[in-house]
Image (spheres, helix red, strand yellow):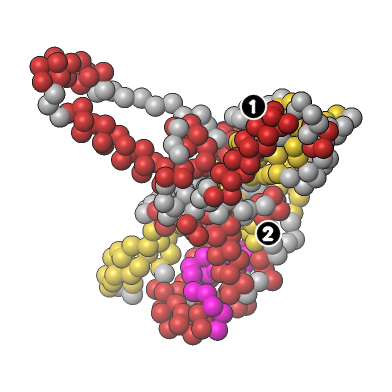
Amino acid sequence: MTVEILVPEMGESVLEATVTSWLKQEGDFVNVGDVLVELETDKVNLEVGAKSSGKLVNIKVKEGEDVKVGDVLGLIDEKVDEAAEAAPGKNAVREKELAQGNGRERERQTAPQVTPVASRLAREKGVDVSKLSGTGAEGRVTRADVEQFLQAEENVKETKEQAPAGKEAEVQSPQREVSSSRPEERIRMSRRRRTIAERLLEAQQTTAMLTTFNEIDMSAVMEIRKRRNEEFQKQHGIKLGFMSFFVKASIGALKAFPQVNAEIDGDEIVLKHFFDMGVAIGAEDGLVVPVLRDADRLSFAGIERQIKEYVTKTNEGKLSIEDLRGGTFTITNGGVFGSMLSTPILNPPQVGILGLHKIEDRPIAMNGRVVIRPMMYVALSYDHRIVDGREAVQFLVKVKELIEDPERLLLEG
């Protein structure tokens, strides 16, 4: 009997994926549970395993092609087993197939750990990842490692081309110079990057998005971190960061202005009386937004610990669908990349997103004097269909008040 290999359910709102790599080839024998193929969605990467033992007789979807939930990836013939294939007359062919299969398996076992993005780029550029030294977590090969290898090869190539090679080289040199003066490169968008592009365009087209700004004096929070960070780290095993303060401050502001913690469903407003806070994290292939569930119930240490876990999982390509599901409000920090000011784009169906920026010493007026303070610009983008300008401004003022007087976070955050 022939069994179909189907694209599995991939979680809420995830309907499509891209085939990144087949780990088994046509003619290979597989057992139940063997990983056959890897899929990339806009959120996570998935492995599809064999649900039957037999021979992989047909691969229907090639690497790089897009598939939907329920599509047939390939076929397994359950009637064919290794014992039958080992019958007289087939030994030579079977031995060759086994040797090829074992070679592929050994190659897979001895290959360095490679992130999905790096693996795809290496295949596109024909790079042998076994030659690379990984600089990522646990020695994983990242996109940056592949790009660095390609740049090094390009530098060597340019050096050879520029070296004098007699009269022929002198004649050909101007032609090469002209042809390489405006180089171009085409790279296929990853599934995640395509989805990010679609969702950003959707946010612009389907929401009445506006942004309001304010600035926050970070002196009090920085002073607390200076006094308490060592003790906090000894007690909880993790540093006290800025994000936990802003998560708590946002929750306090959301409680005061519940329209910002809502979504639109048809002609109804759905107010969320829970706080699942999305925290944007920069990944190799684009931004991901894992969610802190019931963040109002988490301590500062709990928030910092979960964010660190998400960063590690993001770097290792191990985020799950559940890590990214839902979210009622999002915080994104462009300041870690040096951004002074920006207008963050909504993450539908959410109606609010808080943007943090770089802390800079700036002169401000205080009690009739000019003083220097560590200041941060903050931005709130909101859906004007259900959040009025007054509420948006007051929301941001509330965040400012809670950050500048952190003791209030114990009462309101």
1 or 2: tag closer to the N-terminus: 1
Residue depicted at x 13% and y 24%: 165
Q: Taken as a whole, is the magenta stretch helix, strand or loop?
A: helix
Q: Residues within 10 Å of mark 2 (few under 14, many from 20)?
A: many
Snapshot quadrant of residue 59: top right
Q: Residue furthest front?
A: 88
State the residue in front, 94 or 183.
Answer: 94
Q: Pinpoint residue 63: horizontal percent, then vertical percent.
A: 61, 30
Locate the C terminus and report the quarter of the image it occupies.
Answer: bottom right
Residue bearing mark 2: 276
Helix, strand or loop at disc 2? loop
Highlighted range, magenta: 235-253
Q: What residue is shown with label 1? A: 62
Nearer the observer, 319 or 154: 154
Q: Residue at x 56, y 44 (%)?
A: 107
- Place of residue 407 in the rendered image (x, y in percent of width and height, measured from the top left): 54, 79
Task: Verify whether residue 247 appears in magenta.
Answer: yes
